[in-house]
Image (cartoon, grey):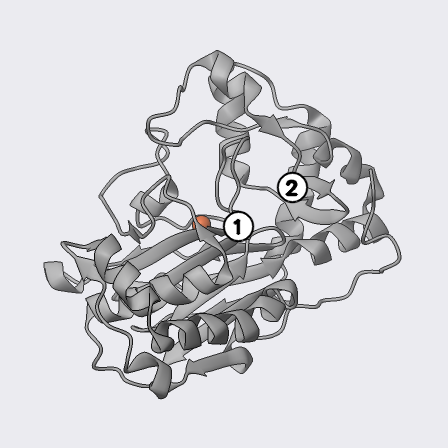
Amino acid sequence: MEDSLKDLTWEKSLPDINDLSITIPQELVEPCPNIIIDEEIDPNLLSDFKKTLPYKRLIDWSKSNLSAIMSSPGFSLLKVSDYKLDNDKLKSLYYIIALGLGTLNDRYGDLFDVRDKKLDYKKEAIPVSKTNASTGFHTDSTALEYSPDIVGLLCLQPAKIGGESILANAADLYLWMKQLHPEDLDILSRPIIRDVITPGSQTDIEAIKKNRFPVFSFVNDSFKFRFMKYWIISGHNRCNLEIPMELKRALDRIDDFFKKKDNLSYYSMVRGDILFVNNNFICHNRTKYEDYDEPERKRILVRTWINQ
Ligand SMILES: [Fe+2]
């Protein structure tokens, strides 16, 4: 295995999210039209806007301001200065900035509403994004064949209580483990079964057994972390397979790293906030939340999955 982190030793490299926000310049926000009809991106409105200078300026701004940040520190928080923008305008702006970072994946639709559907991921194999539960630290996508490079989240409505975002750097985790617990690296570098939860995909036991990949890997010399503890455990359970002791110990060790507050960065998104995280090495978590009673005030984040 190529080891692009081999010369490094562990130290916390994750800055505080609050110290790193960028405000989207108003002169880029204002000319961005609404390109949404019936909650969907309208291809004609988008292609008309693509012919204009304001589109080019917004894409250039996204590329030149965000691309480097996605490599280090691996996340960016964008804010709008105009808080009166409506949902469609915010989503249009977010969508075009996301296009500046790469190609959007449409497995769940280009823009996917993360909201509580009153479902329980512990009773059925559904994404935690459809519940109000804490997600635990994870990277997005549990499918062998697909993993987004960048996960974007736009906040349209925060929760009444909770729903705080927490980030951790898995490259730090890897180096910490290598230095202090090297015995756990081997099992985490081997393919490990994950549950299959993508809607429409085959979910029989054979499909789950084939859905295996490492937690830590180096693809073309680039570090990649793919993790969600719950889907590793439920994948084994559904296949009636005992979790090996070695793996149990390594998963507990990962928990130990995530329990140390010094390794984490916390942020409560407010309306209009856009958070992009590099899904290859920044993992995210969300605390459990409680919604307001009014239907129009339920928590909504709009997710994008982007590949570079
Ligand atoms: Fe997620």
CB at mark 2 closer than 8 A to ligand 1? no
Q: Is label 1 in a helix, a strand or a loop?
A: loop
How many labels, in total?
2
Residue 157 seen: no
Q: In terms of image quadrants, where is residue 124?
A: top left
Residue 303: give x, y in percent of width and height. 36, 54
Mark 2 lies on a secondary structure that is helix
Residue at 33%, 42% in the rendered image = 108
Q: Position of residue 252 (x, y in %)?
A: 65, 41
Residue at the far right in the pictured view: 7
**Residue drawn at (32%, 69%) of the image:** 93
Q: Tell me if residue 20 can be seen.
A: yes
Q: Amino acid at mark 1?
A: Phe
Name the side, left or right, on which 183 lies relative to 37.
right
- The amino acid on which the numbered mark 2 sits, given as a three-letter code, is Asp
Sequence-wise first label, 1 or 2? 1
Q: Which quadrant would residue 84 be assigned to in this image? A: bottom left
Closer to the camera: disc 1 or disc 2? 1
Discs 1, 2 touching: Cβ within 8 Å: no
Label disc, if present, on residue 223 of the rendered structure = none
Horizontal and vertical percent position of residue 144:
55, 30
Real-space Cα separation, disc 1 to disc 2, in angstroms: 13 Å
| Residue at which label 1 appears | 137
Q: At 51% across and 25% down in the image, what residue appears?
A: 235
Q: Which residue is mark 2?
A: 252
